[in-house]
Amino acid sequence: MNYHWNWGIYLEKIKGGEETYLSWLITGLQWTVAVSLCSWIIALVLGFLVGTLRTMPRRGVARLCNAYVELFRNIPLLVQMFLWFFVMPELLPRNLSLWVKQEMPAKEFVTATICLGLFTSARIAEQVRAGIQSLPRGQSYAGLAMGFTLPQTYRYVLLPMAIRIIIPPLTSEFMNVFKNSSVAFAIGVLELTFQARQMQEDSEQGIETYLAVTLLYFVCAFVTNRAMSWIEKRTRVPGLISTAK
Amino acid sequence: MLSQFDFSVFKPSLTFLWTGFLFSGNLTLIAMTGGIVFGTLLAMGRLSSLRPLAVIASAYVNLMRSIPLVMVILWFFLVIPLITGKPIGAERSAIITFTAFEAAYYSEIMRAGIQSVSRGQAMAGYALGMTYWQNMGLVVLPQAFRNMLPILLTQTIILFQDTSLVYAIGAKDLLKAAEIAGKNYNRPMEMYIFVAVIYFVLCFALSTIVKRLHKKIAVVQ
Amino acid sequence: MAMIEIRDVCKWYGGFQVLTGCSSKVEKGEVVVVCGPSGSGKSTLIKCVNGLEPFQKGEILVNGTPVGDPETNLPKLRSGVGMVFQHFELFPHMTVIGNLTVGQVKVLGRKKEEALEKGHALLERVGLTDFAQKHPGQLSGGQQQRVAIARALAMDPICMLFDEPTSALDPEMIGEVLAVMQDLAREGMTMMVVTHEMGFARNVAHRVIFMDHGQIVEDTTKQEFFGTPRSERAQLFLSRILHH
């Protein structure tokens, strides 16, 4: 293999600048974490909302939520990114459109976060729906029989159990968010994948670059997994097998 | 607002988009076939009683599933020329990458499929005097495949969407073709919307078909 | 030389011992019934005879061939030993006739026509001639088990192993399966049968083996077993099972 190894590349300065490659990688990590966490929060809020609504007895509401999920599930994430970045500003009223295109701070970050947040929310909605529907019918009957209104039944009876049941699929969804954040490179977010391409071109030490970036993604996945595992242990219901590891 | 859009650019760019679409479609089909074959072997490896084989297969699957697809694409595009000593086109690299990557996901599906076939079935095959490979080929895998067919197809739809990520290495798929056409006619937005619609219609139609298929299979069982 | 010889077989699942010092013989043409309470190891023992379950100590010889020997060609040995399972285990994705021919063609290397002829003949023998093209899912439990017996017979086995063949059947179907097994015994097939059906044991068996907690507690002729079994455990078991 005709390759010149240079493990010290991380501490070297970039061509035509004062920063080290390591600082590029750190910046990338920061943006990856920022995009992922913010998207995750948006996704959780919207996902639970839509998923819960999906299980309500009203037909029209269920159909709307279905359409929401289908819309985000059938278009590739990268295409959605481009739509949000290039097309969405044009659809806004003139003044807002100009502001978004020219003056909005961290335009790329905001766009990527909204895009990834909505994309993930559709997947979370499906998991929430499945979780609620996996509960025995008797649970909601018991709640209503006690005098709870429907929203109260959801709040005190159904959702607490549903959330615990779906912690495993939510964990892998959370890890997916970190992986999917890599798509944001295409609209110029300075996250890990963007830095990987930039550093590989600049330093010509592709293998060292990619190894470091891959390792950093592993670290994110590991920390996420551990965090969700901790949450799962803290919220475990004694005597219930479904939450066993 | 919508009046600024000029959708008349579709007609002249259609042949160009078609070439890109063909690449995306081909890539999907090749990666699906290769991925399922390789993935089934990986699944059998993971479930095998030979420890080193199980460990290697496990490690491969877990590795592929932990890294973003874009990174895997970049990795293969970098490393293949280093190994072969010759440069490789983005399209060829994409085919190898996607087959290797999707195999990990198909392997998890086939693993669940193999485990869904009751142990007694395998025992019955062995009791007749079948070897391991005969048993797998005649008894276990046909049933595993049938059980998991809807999930395998769903994964293929996801694969089709994932092919858009070859953008990272500049391969000419549907999305790249749309971007180029958009620049040529100075109508990037119309192109992106058009491609989004194509993807949506195709994937929605396919997933509806898969849902119907799922119902049919469930009834027979 | 006995058809099946079991010498001092011991088996552990991890740290738990499931078979302890089991020894017995089945001569050619003999019908031996293995009975005992749940968890006594009888299913495990019979699965050791054709090597479906490994064992850590002792020896098992089938027609002189050692089952536990790594040099032994297990698939070849198994193709000569017929096995019938509690849950029938017909291959659901093949037709009935497909189930009967797959072993003949793929394992024994017979020609398709020969296999089909034999398959149809066996179907007639178990009384299911019209079911050749059906799928297992379309048959009742009793019918499926009779096809399973035919599938094992299609391989021209030198002996047959039955692992609780009627335990998963509705009561009204048990009779039709036992009838086929009785016919087999009358024709001189060497059979080792794990079962709770004491009626079958009384009518057809030559010997009865009683197992408890992984050990062979009684191994006597049928007359002795039903007359005056020597161990308390066997007596307790018999009294429970016969007073249904």
Image: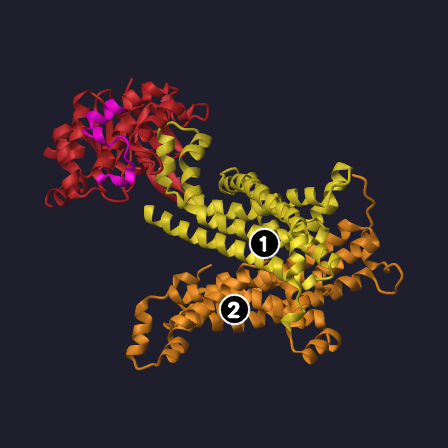
Query: Is A139 positioned to the left or the right of A70 in the image?
Result: left
- Give the percent coordinates (x, y) of residue A4: 83, 45
**Dot in front, 2 or 1:** 1
Pointer 2 indicates a residue of which chain? Answer: A
User: Which one of the lettered chains is coloured red?
Assistant: C
Q: Amino acid at mark 1?
A: Gln
The residue lying toward the viewer, choosing from A82 and B159, is A82
Looking at the image, which residue sits at the far right?
A16
- Quadrant in which the N terminus of chain A appears: top right
Element class at badge 2: helix
- Give the percent coordinates (x, y) of residue C99: 32, 31
The image shows residue A232, relative to residue A76, as above or below, that is below
Q: How many marks?
A: 2
Q: Quadrant of residue C111?
A: top left
- Give the percent coordinates (x, y) of residue A183: 66, 60
The residue lying toward the viewer, choosing from A141 and A219, is A141
Q: Which residue was labeled with disc 1?
A: B161
Q: Magenta stretch containing residue C135, yes or no?
A: yes
Q: Are marks 2 and 1 on the same chain?
A: no
Element class at badge 1: helix
Q: Quadrant of residue C70?
A: top left
Magenta residues, as a range? C120-141
Identity of the residue drawn at 34% across and 41% down: C18
The residue lying toward the viewer, choosing from A42 and B178, is B178
Residue C8 appears in the picture as rendered: no
Q: Colour of chain B?
A: yellow
How busy is the neighbourhood of tag 1: few (under 14 within 10 Å), some, or many (20 plus)? many
